[in-house]
Amino acid sequence: MLRLARRAMLTGAAAVMGAIALGGCVLLGSNRHDDAQRELNQNRRLWEAQGIDDYRFVARRSCFCGQEATAPVVVEVRGDQIVSLTYQETGEPVTETYAGLWPSLDGVFDIVQDAIDRDSYQVIVEYDRERGFPTVISLDYIEQAIDDELVFYSGPFELLP
């Protein structure tokens, strides 16, 4: 009886060690953000292929930040350059202090790339099916860290003449 129990214990231990070894190979042999990178590349190509340089969209951030960093902002882009940033509710311009928080859509793609490059704990992105730009980005940079999460919304989107 003791021999059977010992054999079962050794078999179980071998199975656990095998799973750990196999798991280690899988983790070392692949990047957990490969799918996110493929999806980002595909949608960035779709966006760039359209050659859209003049547009407007509303950007919103959800983070542990102040009102100036989370209120919806209208981002207007002409010639592929941001020409104005205004708070949607008041029409007031975004101050220079907060202007860097509100990128063009090319910059929104860069937010996703940065999170992938930093091997963030969580990178979840939804893309506009027609245009390809990210519409919702949900990031958690560090597992179990407090106040490092960011959700970024892009839309609605409008082409400008």
Image (cartoon, rainbow, N blue to C red):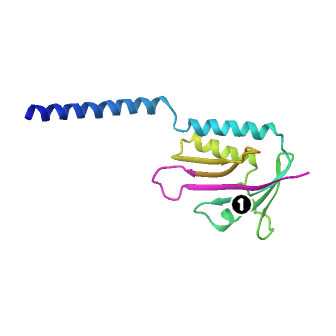
Residue 156 seen in the current view: yes
The correct choice, above or below, for 66 with respect to 3 in the image is: below
Residue 101 seen in the current view: no
124 falls in the magenta region: no
145 falls in the magenta region: yes
Residue at 18 percent of width and 34 percent of height: 8
Residue at 76 percent of width and 45 percent of height: 130
Q: Quadrant of residue 48?
A: top right
Horizontal side of 6 relative to 91 (left or right) equals left
Amino acid tagged 1: Thr
Residue bounds of the magenta highlight: 139-161
Horizontal side of 99 relative to 121 (left or right) equals right
Pointer 1: residues within 10 angstroms few (<14), some, or many (20+)? few
Residue at 68 percent of width and 56 percent of height: 153
Residue at 87 percent of width and 46 percent of height: 79
Q: Position of residue 3 (x, y in %)?
A: 10, 31
The one nearer the camera, 91 or 33, is 33
Q: Position of residue 131 (x, y in %)?
A: 76, 45
Name the outermost residue toward the left: 1
Total residue callouts:
1
The correct choice, above or below, for 1 with respect to 157 in the image is: above
Disc 1: which residue? 97
- Label 1: element kind: helix
The correct choice, above or below, for 148 with respect to 118 in the image is: below
Name the outermost residue toward the right: 161
Q: Position of residue 139 (x, y in %)?
A: 57, 51
Horizontal side of 145 relative to 150 (left or right) equals left
Q: Position of residue 63 (x, y in %)?
A: 59, 60
Specify the quadrant that holds the N terminus. Answer: top left
Q: Quadrant of residue 11?
A: top left
